[in-house]
Image: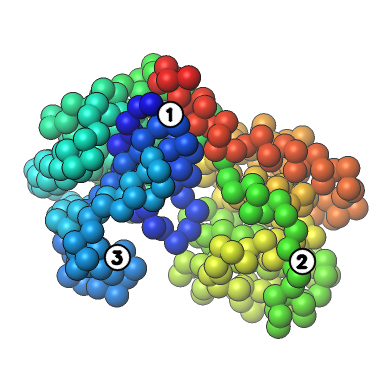
Amino acid sequence: MSNFVIFSLSRWNEEFGCNIRDISIELAKNHKVLFIDVPLKRKDRLFDTKSNRVKEVEKRAADAANIIQVSENLWHYIDFSVLESVNSIQYSWLFDLINRINNKRFAGVIKKAVEQLNFEPYILLNDNDIYNGLYLRKHLTPSLYIYYLRDRLSAMKYWQKHVTRLEPDLIRQVDMVVANSVYLAESAATLNQNSFYIGQGCAIDHFANRPRDIYIEGFTDRIKKPIVGYIGAINSERLDIQLILNVASKLKEFSFVFVGKEDNAFEKCDLHKMDNVFFTGNQDFSILPKYLYSFDVAINPQLLNDVTIGNYPRKIDEFLAAGKPVVATETPTMRPFSEYVYLAKNADEYIKMIRQAILEDSQEQQKSRKDFASTHNWKNSVEVLLKHVNLE
């Protein structure tokens, strides 16, 4: 049994699906896991006091409970210190200076948590946190330092300024990179030969079982079928608004339902003016299967860009786990799904394939989709990770 210390861009109690939390839970079945939330930024503590993440820190501080045991081998640690906000700093030299200070502070948090739980020796697993993981080698001595690469942050507007120059340094210095898509693993391998694809899982069981009542009263029970649906973040950096407009305008006989939180571009777009397009807003994870099982076809109308090209399509596994026919934008990461998913390159192909998906759907195909999705689970992904770490 080994000790894993894990930190992430995501906090443990995120309100949405989180890869690293699922990996931590799976690792904890046979190893000890300490998940450490990166301390909040100073501006969040001062100006975002109503957010759940700040409230959680304040409650844990009031209760003097910086560490909570989640399960037999899994602990969640919150420190009450703060880090400085750095992403908006324009000057690289000033960013680096303050980020080094942040790293030293965070290393102190990790040391304190490790000592409190007697977690030496330990493997350090960094989930896509480039800034706070960049200089930890100078302050910590893990037996192995692993970088989990699951998103191309350098392609995202928010991160571009500093991540583009810093992530290659992080990838070169760690002992190992593991990625959830072949594209990302191959990209990392140009900088670190110890870069491996470990696959991905999702909450298969949550979506595989059809709810007794698949209708949301006052919503899906009143929407005309057939329904084409999407569940996930409704983000214009990832989803193609113009493509959706084209498809929905030409498939007037279909209803289009989008479940999730919209960004500003989606909130202001012409989709809201269309009679056959519906937005539900953000919904609790527990009722997402109700929406999914009300769909006749699920879609993932991605933009093809530097952000999406290497992303593992977790939502596709969730759609397939319910046996639903799926039409998705063709990307390099989607090609292994081609036997089970209709892959489209443009609006005309989406229109053709949505109609085709409904006509060709069958119980045999539904079972095949479910069986395929079931192979993408966290047990398999963690087993591959552990083999590369030489623990299996």
- The foreground one among 56 and 148 is 56
Disc tally is 3
Q: Nearer the viewer, residue 118 or 153?
A: 118
> On the picture, is 133 further left or further right than 248?
left
* Badge nearest the viewer, 3 or 1: 3
Rendered residue at 64%/47% (across/down):
204
In the shown orientation, is residue 203 left or right of residue 41?
Answer: right
Proximity of marks 3 and 1: CB atoms separated by less than 8 Å: no
Q: Are marks 3 and 2 in contact (CB under 8 Å)?
A: no
In the rendered image, is residue 379 in sight? yes
Residue 178 marker: 1
Q: CA distance from mark 3 to mark 2?
A: 34 Å
**Where does label 3 land, which residue?**
56
User: Label 1 is placed on what type of residue?
Assistant: Val
* Residue 75 x/y as whole percent: 33, 46
Residue in the foreground of this view, choosing between 313 and 12:
12
Where residue 265 sits: x, y (%)?
A: 49, 67
**x 15%, y 43%: residue:** 112
Q: Where 77 sits versus 374, above or below? A: below
On the rendered structure, is 75 left or right of 116?
A: right
Q: Nearer the viewer, mark 1 or mark 2?
A: 2
Q: Residue furthest bottom?
A: 218
Question: Mark 2 sits on what residue?
Answer: 212
- The location of residue 327, given as percent across then percent down, is 73, 49
Crowd band around label 3 with a 10 angstrom C-alpha radius: few (<14), some (14–19), many (20+): few
**Residue plotted at (35% across, 20% down):** 192
